[in-house]
Amino acid sequence: MGRPIMFQGTASNAGKSFIVAAFCRIFHQDGLKVIPFKSQNMALNSYITEEGLEMGRAQVFQAEAAGVLPNVKMNPVLLKPHADKHCQVVLNGKVYGNMSAVEYHEFKPQLSGMIREVYETIERENDVVVIEGAGSPAEINLRDKDIVNMGMAEIADSPVILIGDIDKGGVFAALVGTIMLLTEEEKKRVKGVIINKFRGDVKILEPGIKMLEDIIKIPVLGVIPYMHVNIEDEDSLTTRFNHQSNKQKDIQVEVVCLPHISNFTDCNIFETQEDVSIKYITRGKNIGNPDVLIIPGSKNTIEDLLYLKESGLAKQIIEFSKAGKLVVGICGGYQILGKKLCDPRGVECGIGELDGLGLLDIETVFEEEKVTTQVQGTINQNLSGYLEGLADKKVCGYEIHMGISTLGKGASPILTINERLGQKVECQEGCTNEEGNVIGTYLHGIFDEIEFTRSLLNHIRDKKGLEAKISDVTSFKEFKDREYDKMAQIVRESVDLETIYKLIRE
């Protein structure tokens, strides 16, 4: 029977996901069978398992750090917001339905038994379960129906370590305030505090740490420095968009930040390539003069298409494509690049039909059933433009979409899928225009295969009169493993690991 350890935060983006991943790696390195767990995750970054089930990406990179395959048991409840007060509810990897915030709050008590059953299963199968909370445990208006913070700690009978983010400022007030708003029973579960994202000399903090411990009567188990590690972010709360390098490299990639952007982790691979700089076009910004423009996934494609038109970005994208530069649309971005989007069943919003940007000869109809699958394939023969010479390059990834796109005469499929959910198949996917500079695909993770991506980048280098480059990273997995090890080492050196192991044993 395994034992739990739970990490909660004083607020969202306190670093819970990273710290859980770091401890998953540490326990894995120490020879334990470890698994991450988050009962309820709210994120637009999701992943499809090899069984075709959907889960949050935070638990995916935590699973990678733990050395295990992602499994939907790690995240039995996933909430995917598609409007301010509504979200899609995914239970055990399958869409349950759409709910308003009030409806879901009333629905949560029905999930408690299912969450307990899933948790007890993974606890039996592992030595340690590293549990992540959500937001803050001091959301006193949500306490009576909580299933992800102290409610989850009670289900697992787990000790809790509370994380405070010092980078935001006010960390001592946040930690004290959080503890003061907990019930007496909840306070007893909090066995330690970690101060995260510290920049500077820890000696400066020592007087404050002593006063904090005197006030809350809970030990500070570590101060973790601000970690410069390249690990994917959980959701759009990421600071990635706001902390971008201004250094111009040989190849510039720009990514349009849609209001309902999802799975922007598709672009993380470019950050591993030394000759590529990446910039995110946030609200109010204009498209520059990149070599590659990416329209990413969206949880509400029609509303995001309206945003592009109203902001003037749609016109900029069209003009950019006319200049012969490379435009890539992934999932919702692929649909946006087409001629028409039809939503006869009101799957996305109340708009039944809307013209797309018209850069690809496709029409998309939204269906009520979501496509969720892992696939492998190869780039097709006889393609022109940017995919010329890339025939038979292997690509793999996963699909998550409600729309079905039909190709017209002016669109050529870009790849042949030969494996879906482990079964041999043969079907066409994605498309490009006749000029070969506008590419669309439903395949999330299409760039994660280094050989394909490096070949595409070298094609761009050739067009610019630059010599080809070889990637320093032989695989994306190898790169991520190095980052997990780096993160684990930083955390090992920054916390009282002996006490944390003692908490697990007790």
Image: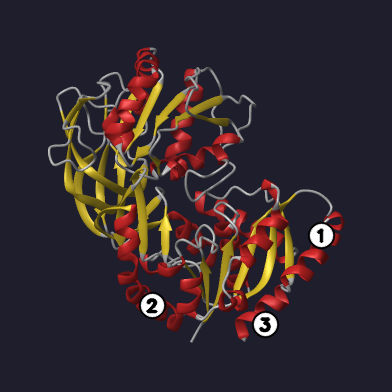
Q: Position of residue 327 (x, y in %)?
A: 38, 25
Secondary structure beneath dot 1 equals helix
Q: Nearer the viewer, residue 187 or 61?
A: 187
Measured as percent of width and height from the top left, residue 270 is found at 52, 37
Residue occupying the point 58% across, 71% down: 28
Label 2–label 1 contact, CB within 8 A: no
Residue in front for this viewpoint, 286 or 63: 286
The residue type indicated by label 2 comes to Arg
Residue type for callout 1 = Gly
Q: Is residue 71 visible?
A: yes
What is the x, y in percent for residue 24? 56, 67
- Kind of residue at disc 3: Lys
Which of the two discs, 2 and 3, labels the residue nearer the N terminus?
2
Measured Cα–Cα span from mark 2 to mark 1: 39 Å
User: Could you tell me which secondary element the residue under label 2 belongs to?
Assistant: helix
Above or below, comparing residue 342 to residue 133 in the picture: above
Give the residue at mark 2: 116
Instruction: Locate residue 502: give its quadrant.
Output: bottom right
Crowding at mark 2 (Cα within 10 Å: few <14, some 14-19, many 20+): some
Residue 215 in the image: state x and y as whole percent: 75, 68
Mark 2 vs mark 3, CA separation in Å: 24 Å
Q: Vertically, is 435 above or below 7?
A: above
Which residue was labeled with disc 1? 208
Q: For the point 51% across and 60% down, which residue is it?
A: 139
Point out the tag, 2 or 1, that comes first from the N-terminus.
2
Disc 3 or disc 1, which is closer to the eye?
1
- The residue where tag 3 is placed is 502
The reply, left or right, for residue 239 in relation to residue 449 is right
Q: Residue at x 51, y 45 (%)?
A: 237
Instruction: Specify the color scheme.
Output: secondary structure
Cα distance between the residues tagged 3 and 1: 25 Å
